[in-house]
Image (tube, rainbow, N blue to C red):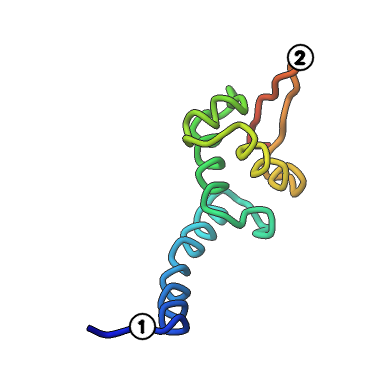
């Protein structure tokens, strides 16, 4: 049985972690997003893809949460940086928000 040190494990995991980042950059480029600073986690990639699929209709925070299997608070936390960098926009209807790609 071989014991693996933490540094060996973390080096291996870092090498594997570049694939999601590459696919994130590919998606951002395909969508015409120039600023990668706003999109930095795979969950944001999923949100952008869902919004792209729903086009002009957009999705509410609750609909995004249900599609992603996350809480509305987590979705909102992921959406706010995207909004800050202009990757998504929102329309407030009473106390609910609908999110769109600009």
Residue 61 location (% of width, % of height)? 62, 28
Secondary structure under badge 1? loop
Q: Choose between 25 and 94: the one closer to the eye.
A: 94
Establish if 39 lies above or below 73: below
Q: Is residue 25 left or right of residue 17?
A: right
Extreme top residue here?
A: 94
45 over 89 or under it: above or below: below
Residue 100 lies, in percent from the top left, at 64, 32
Who is closer to the viewer here, 67 or 48? Answer: 67
Q: Quadrant of the N terminus?
A: bottom left
Q: Is residue 23 left or right of residue 83?
A: left
Quarter placement of the C terminus: top right
- Measured in 3D between alpha carbons, the distance from the residue under mark 1 to the one under mark 2, in whole angstroms, is 55 Å
Q: Where 25 falls versus 9 (above or below)? A: above
Q: Residue at x 49, y 33 (%)?
A: 53
Residue drawn at the location 49% of the way across and 28% of the way down: 66
- Frontmost of labels 1 and 2 is 1
Residue 58 sits above or below residue 25 on the image: above
x, y (%) of residue 42? 52, 52
- Say whether marks 1 and 2 touch (CB < 8 Å): no
Q: Who comes first in sequence, dot 1 or dot 2? A: 1
Q: Residues within 10 Å of mark 2 (few under 14, many from 20)?
A: few
- Which residue is the site of mark 2? 94
Q: Residues within 10 Å of mark 1 (few under 14, many from 20)?
A: few
Q: Read off the residue under disc 1.
A: 4
* Disc 2, SS: loop
- 3 with respect to 15 (left or right): left
Which residue occupies 69% across, 46% down? 82
Residue 80 x, y percent position in the rendering = 72, 42
**Relative to 63, 77 lies left or right:** right
């Amino acid at each position: 049985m071989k014991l693996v040190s933490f540094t060996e494990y973390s080096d291996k995991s870092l090498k594997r972690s570049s694939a999601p980042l590459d696919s994130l950059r590919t998606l951002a480029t395909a969508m015409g997003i120039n600023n990668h600073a706003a999109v930095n986690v795979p969950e944001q990639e999923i949100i952008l893809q869902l919004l792209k699929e729903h086009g002009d209709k957009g999705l509410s925070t609750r609909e995004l949460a249900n599609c992603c299997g996350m809480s509305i608070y987590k979705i909102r936390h992921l959406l706010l940086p995207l909004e800050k960098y202009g990757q998504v926009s929102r329309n407030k209807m009473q106390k609910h928000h609908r999110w769109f790609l600009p």
